[in-house]
Structure formats: structure tokens, C-alpha cells
Image: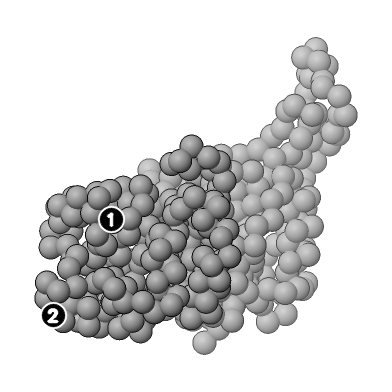
């Protein structure tokens, strides 16, 4: 995701500096070249040698080491990340004080900047720090976190530096071209659960990973995303408007509610096809359950197809076996623009895994087969398809 990108990474003096090692490792794994700049205080928390080993390059610390590094490093950078960002550095940045290499770099830098603050909660809430944060936000700096929780000083509160995955996600988002800006995409994900009594339900094996990957990829590309999800254990993608539902009925209501303001609908959810005919208010005794009576749920895509208008509808066909004819039938019946066929019985495809093997079929019946790839890459291919339909 970050191939060919150069990131200038500032580390300032906080105990959270140990987290930067993981962030930088992940940025490099995504293909970025990372130049590390450390303040004097940062070197007290973590030896520069640690960063030299993971980046394979020298760490920049000294304003007077190389006369032009404060000019050349920012010129070469596609993105500046300060993590951890202390109250001291945030205040200096806001005031334009250039008394070390990092603060001098800031004055010469003209691109996108991300900052992950880390400090005690009283310092974070201090009006001077708050004023600096507001000032920097106004200049376009994007703050990631901080989170609430246990702090190094033993207190609880706001001030914990954001997790590595959040900083990396923000970096990828900042560097992804916004070709979906203006799109409002409604995505459904996960299973639905259909209760038979207060403790039991029927459901399916969907993990939600495919729908969440579509939401994440669309957000990175600048779309507004509403993600309607059945029960999953996944973290919501940063920036998505989340709607949590349980049953097929709930999901239908949520889709109907949000469709009006959406330009596209991508139904990646594995909606339960059946629901118990009766939901018992109290727990059924074992002896009372001899047979389970089911009724069919309404087909959400079919139901909303009357409101399609100019919207793009994309569905999935979960099949066991590469049943292209069946997928084409679903595309037609549900009035879809594209259908993504996945053989859930294939190794590396379908439920619970991070990869998928799909065939994408359009309205003209042309089918394009893709080999095993990450769900995030499948998501981008689906979104490319959506953009091509729009063009
Ligand atoms: N879908 C829906 N409402 C349902 C069931 C499915 O909107 N009650 C959507 C799914 O989200 C998916 C598409 O329809 O985008 C196809 O779902 P799939 O489970 O593959 O097919 P079904 O239509 O349920 O048919 P079958 O289970 O018989 O294959």
C-alpha cells in the first residue's frame, strides 16, 4: 500500500516511543521508506540504534550534523508522522519554534502531517496544549488518538498513544488517492442471527471480514461509508458510520433507512435465509424442542431493488462450487450491476479467512476470474468495478 512512498517519522521524548518501533516496522512492511528523526529527549527513552536496525538507515538527530537535512528531509517526504508527539513538541510546532532538527523540519515541511499525542491527561487537557492542538488542526494536521486507559504514571485517563495499527491505517489513508470522493457507499457485512428464544439462535459462519475490508478500502479512497454489520468480533474501520444489527429483519430496516442517502449499496452480508417461525419469550426446555419450525426471511436486495434509481447495487453469491450460472441468475433476479461469486468451500476463500478467490460478473454476463488474494485487494477490485460502472 505504501510502495514508493517516503515517510519522515519524528520520535519525541515519551515512554510511548517503544510503540514507534512497531509502527515503523509495519510501514516498512507496507513498502514505505522511513527516515527517522529523534529529539534529544526521545533518545533517552529508546536508543537510535534500534531504529537504525529496523530501517537499515542512519537516524537523524542533530540540527548541526548535516547543514541541510532540515530542508532536504521534508522536501523528499510524502508524509510526516510524529509518534509519539509530546506536549512540548505540539506546543513548539504550534508556535513555530525551531530549536532542534525536528521542529526545524516542521517549518520547512509543506505536506500532510499526522501526530499521535502521548502524555498525562492533565497535560493533554491543559488549555495551552489544547490551543496548540486546535491551531495545528486548523493547519491541516491530523491527530490520531490519544486513547483513554492506564497511563505510564499510574493514572487512568486520556493520553495513551494510539495503537500502531491506527497510526499505520491513518498513514495509508493519507497517502491513498481519493478517487471515491463524493461517493456515499452503504456496505453490509457479517452474518445475521435469528433468535428462537432468549439464549439460542441460528446463524451462519460469516466473519464479516469481506464487508469490513470493502468499508476500509472505500474509506481509504475517500468515500463516505455506512457499514451495517451483523454480530462480528472485528474492530470498526476508522471513519465508518457503524450500524450494528442482529437479525435479517433489523438489517433490512437499517438498509432501507440508509439507502436514501447512499449512491451505492454493496451487500456483502450473509443474511440468514431462514428464521424461527416463533421466537419464544422464555428459554425453551430441552424437552420442548423436538422440531424447529422456520420461515423464510425477506430478500433485502429484492426488497430494495424498487428504490434502486441510479444507484449501483453490488451483491455477493456465496456458493459451494464455481456456480457461475447460479450467480448470473442471482444478479438478474436481484437487479444487480455486479455480483461477486465466491466458492466458500475453496481453501483460502469464504468465511473467516483474510483471503478470497472471486469471480466478478457484470450485467452483460462477462465474468472475470481472480486468483487467491487478500480480502482488502478483492475490496479494491470491487470498488474499481463500481467506479468503472459510474464512468
Ligand atoms: N441477500 C439479501 N437478503 C437475503 C439473502 C441474501 O439481500 N435474505 C443478499 C446477500 O447479501 C448477497 C446476495 O443476496 O449479496 C446473494 O446471497 P446468497 O446467500 O448467495 O444467495 P441467496 O439469494 O440467499 O440464495 P441461496 O442461499 O439459495 O443461494
Residues 233 and 389: in front is 233
Q: Badge 2: few (under 14), some or many (20 or more) residues near its Cα, within 10 Å?
A: few
Residues 226 and 140: in front is 140
- Number of numbered discs visible in the structure rendering: 2
Q: Quadrant of the N terminus?
A: bottom left
Q: In 3D space, how far apart are the residues under numbered discs 2 and 1 (Cα atoms)?
A: 21 Å
Residues 333 and 217: in front is 217
On screen, residue 260 versus residue 206, left or right, reads: right
**Residue drawn 13% across the image and 58% down it:** 56
Task: Identify residue for label 2.
Answer: 67
Please tell me whether mark 2 sits on a helix, a strand or a loop. Answer: loop
**Residue drawn 28% across the image and 48% down it:** 45
Classify 294 as above or below 380: above
Q: Where in the figure is residue 191, as x and y percent of width and height?
A: 63, 45
Q: Residue furthest top?
A: 287
Q: Where in the figure is residue 388, as x and y percent of width and height?
A: 49, 81
Q: Where in the figure is residue 19, as x and y percent of width and height?
A: 34, 49
- The answer to whether one can see residue 138 in this image is yes
- The answer to whether one can see residue 112 in this image is no
**Residue drawn 72% across the image and 74% down it:** 261
**Residue drawn 72% across the image and 32% down it:** 201
Q: Which mark is residue 146?
A: none
Q: Quadrant of residue 300?
A: bottom right
Residues 43 and 255: in front is 43
Please tell me whether mark 1 sits on a helix, a strand or a loop. Answer: helix
On screen, residue 142 versus residue 62, left or right, reads: right
Task: Identify residue for label 1.
Answer: 42
Q: Badge 1: few (under 14), some or many (20 or more) residues near its Cα, within 10 Å?
A: many
Tags 2 and 1 touching, CB below 8 Å: no
Q: Quadrant of residue 282?
A: top right
Identify the mark nearer the N-term, 2 or 1: 1
Q: Where in the figure is residue 63, as x and y percent of width and height?
A: 19, 73
Amino acid at each position: 500500500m505504501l510502495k514508493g512512498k517516503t515517510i519522515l517519522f519524528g520520535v519525541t521524548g515519551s515512554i510511548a516511543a517503544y510503540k514507534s518501533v512497531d509502527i515503523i516496522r509495519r510501514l516498512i512492511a507496507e513498502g514505505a521508506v522511513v527516515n527517522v528523526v529523534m529529539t534529544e529527549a526521545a533518545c533517552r527513552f529508546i536508543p537510535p540504534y534500534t531504529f537504525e536496525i529496523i530501517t537499515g538507515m542512519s537516524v537523524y538527530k542533530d540540527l548541526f550534523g548535516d547543514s541541510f537535512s532540515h530542508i532536504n528531509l521534508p522536501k523528499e517526504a510524502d508524509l510526516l508522522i510524529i509518534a509519539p508527539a509530546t506536549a512540548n513538541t505540539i506546543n513548539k510546532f504550534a508556535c513555530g519554534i525551531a530549536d532542534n532538527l525536528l521542529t526545524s523540519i516542521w517549518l520547512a515541511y509543506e505536506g500532510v502531517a499526522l501526530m499521535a499525542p502521548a502524555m498525562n491527561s492533565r497535560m493533554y487537557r491543559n488549555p495551552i496544549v489544547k490551543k496548540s492542538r486546535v491551531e495545528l488542526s486548523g493547519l491541516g494536521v491530523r491527530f490520531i488518538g490519544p486513547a483513554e486507559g492506564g497511563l505510564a504514571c499510574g493514572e487512568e485517563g486520556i493520553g495513551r498513544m494510539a495503537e500502531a495499527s491506527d497510526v499505520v491505517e491513518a498513514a495509508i489513508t493519507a497517502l491513498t488517492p481519493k478517487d471515491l470522493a463524493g461517493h456515499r457507499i452503504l456496505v453490509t457485512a457479517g452474518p445475521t442471527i435469528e433468535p428462537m428464544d432468549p439464549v439460542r439462535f441460528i446463524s451462519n459462519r460469516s466473519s464479516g471480514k469481506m464487508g469490513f475490508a470493502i468499508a476500509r478500502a472505500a474509506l481509504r479512497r475517500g468515500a463516505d461509508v455506512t457499514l451495517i454489520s451483523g454480530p462480528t468480533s472485528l474492530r470498526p474501520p476508522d471513519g465508518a458510520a457503524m450500524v450494528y444489527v442482529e437479525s435479517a429483519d433489523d438489517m433490512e430496516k437499517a438498509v432501507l433507512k440508509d439507502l436514501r442517502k447512499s449512491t451505492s449499496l454493496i451487500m456483502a452480508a450473509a443474511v440468514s435465509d431462514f428464521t424461527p417461525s416463533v421466537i419464544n419469550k422464555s428459554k425453551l426446555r430441552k424437552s420442548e424442542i423436538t422440531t424447529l419450525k422456520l420461515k423464510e426471511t425477506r430478500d433485502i436486495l429484492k426488497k430494495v431493488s424498487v428504490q434502486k434509481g441510479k444507484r449501483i447495487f453490488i451483491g455477493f453469491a456465496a456458493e459451494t462450487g464455481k456456480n457461475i450460472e447460479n450467480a448470473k441468475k442471482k444478479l438478474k433476479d436481484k437487479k444487480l450491476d455486479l455480483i461477486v461469486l465466491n466458492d466458500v468451500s475453496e481453501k483460502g476463500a469464504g468465511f473467516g479467512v483474510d483471503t478470497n478467490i472471486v469471480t466478478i460478473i457484470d450485467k452483460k454476463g462477462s465474468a472475470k476470474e481472480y486468483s487467491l488474494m487478500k480480502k482488502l485487494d478483492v475490496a479494491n477490485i470491487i470498488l474499481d468495478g463500481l467506479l468503472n460502472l459510474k464512468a
